């Protein structure tokens, strides 16, 4: 996504506007307007009568959109054939559909309500909100498609560790740092050393070759973890290290022998991403992704079924 940034702005003068007409341009024409906004254009001159500032100070504008692009340009030419007044819009989809704008606002308000209510009320780190409560408090009426979007938006929030969807409610697990009323027993106080030990990440551990390991999450109990047959700093390609850098940068809480064998407990990473990473290394991902992320010299996991196409 792109935006316009002003150096040391004195203020941002926001202006009320209405879109009088949307004009879809060939992408090369749209990009030319962005590069040469003070050049005269026929499609602006032909619609001069649709652009003006009314008695209430509202700008009546053209919305220019390039084919296949998400961004747009609002233009009020004030009687001229060029962009005398213009505003760049990084995502113009909401302007072309008021219904979509209302849906976006409803989705955002619903997610904000879920996160704020949960973090401020939980004493254990998780909070369940019913669909009926959401409908009453935010006006959100759930259905299959919209609930998928809500789940994705919740996963994107930094406060959220994991989300589970029930038949009539949403169960959200939060990182404890965002839960002021967490009532867990305080850990035994240990005097801090003069110099804190550096944080060890999974990336650091991969300097050594590991075999038959299981990646666990410190705060969230995962389903039966996948066995990773071999893992070291040469297992992933450059693209793989880029795609999974959040997992590689996870903090190592401890390494121990547990129920599943050799287990590495990680923190500061979303449980869903940790689970997806282990599944990918076990072969449960599209072949194209596996070939892109896993180096050729690494042997394919012998315990995994055929990878999904």
Image: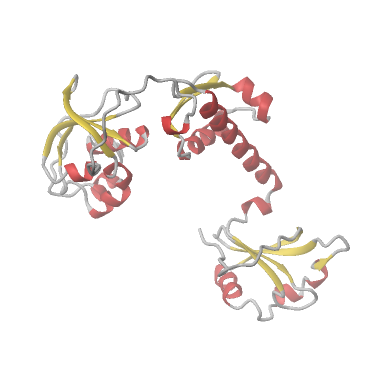
Left or right of 77, for residue 254: left
Residue drawn at (29%, 47%), measured in percent from left and top? 288
Find residue 45 and report its horizontal and vertical position in percent: 75, 76
Residue 213 quadrant: top left
Q: Is residue 262 visible?
A: no
Question: Which quadrant holds residue 85?
Answer: bottom right
Residue 99 position within the rendered picture, expressed as x and y whole percent measured from the top left: 69, 43
Task: Tell me which residue sits at (78%, 63%) in the image.
Answer: 59
Please tell me which residue is depicted at 86% across the width and 64% down the height of the picture.
54
Taking the view exactly as shown, the residue that stands out farthest to the right is 55
Residue drawn 81% across the image and 61% down it: 58
Between 65 and 307, the residue placed more toward the observer is: 65
Q: In this view, does 10 lie above or below 107?
A: below
- Which residue is at the front of the view, 79 or 121? 121
- How many marks on residues? 0
Point out the image quarter for the C terminus.
top left
Residue 123 seen by the camera: yes
User: Could you tell me residue 134's position as x and y percent?
Assistant: 62, 26
Which image quarter: residue 27?
Answer: bottom right
Q: Would you say 137 lies left or right of 299 here?
A: right
- In this rendering, position of residue 196 left or right of residue 176: left
Residue 2 at x, y percent in the picture: 52, 61
Q: Please indicate whether residue 198 sits to the left or right of residue 54 in the image.
A: left
Position above or below: 27 against 189: below
């Amino acid at each position: 996504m792109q935006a316009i940034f002003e150096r040391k702005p004195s203020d941002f003068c926001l202006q009320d506007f209405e879109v009088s007409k949307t004009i879809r341009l060939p992408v090369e024409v749209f990009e030319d307007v962005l590069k040469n906004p003070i050049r005269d254009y026929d499609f602006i001159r032909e619609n001069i009568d649709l652009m003006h500032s009314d008695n209430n100070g509202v700008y009546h504008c053209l919305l220019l959109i390039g084919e296949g692009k998400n961004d747009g340009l609002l233009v009020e030419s004030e009687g001229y054939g060029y962009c005398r007044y213009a505003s760049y819009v990084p995502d113009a989809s909401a302007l072309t559909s008021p219904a979509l704008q209302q849906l976006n606002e409803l989705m955002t308000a619903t997610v904000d309500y879920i996160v704020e209510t949960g973090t401020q009320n939980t004493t254990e780190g998780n909070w369940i909100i019913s669909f009926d409560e959401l409908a009453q408090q935010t006006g959100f009426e759930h259905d299959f498609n919209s609930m998928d979007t809500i789940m994705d938006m919740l996963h994107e929030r930094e406060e959220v560790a994991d989300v589970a969807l029930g038949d009539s409610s949403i169960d959200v697990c939060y990182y404890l740092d965002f839960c002021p009323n967490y009532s867990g027993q305080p850990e035994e106080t240990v005097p801090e050393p003069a110099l804190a030990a550096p944080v060890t990440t999974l990336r650091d551990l991969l300097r050594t070759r590991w075999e038959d390991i299981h990646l666990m999450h410190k705060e969230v109990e995962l389903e039966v973890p996948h066995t990773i047959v071999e893992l070291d700093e040469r297992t992933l390609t450059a693209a793989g290290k880029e795609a999974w850098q959040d997992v590689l940068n996870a903090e190592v809480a401890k390494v121990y022998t547990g129920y599943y064998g050799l287990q590495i407990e990680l923190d500061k990473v979303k449980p869903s991403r940790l689970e997806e990473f282990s599944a990918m290394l076990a072969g449960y991902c599209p072949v194209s992704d596996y070939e892109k992320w896993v180096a050729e010299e690494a042997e394919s996991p012998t315990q995994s079924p055929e990878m999904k196409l």
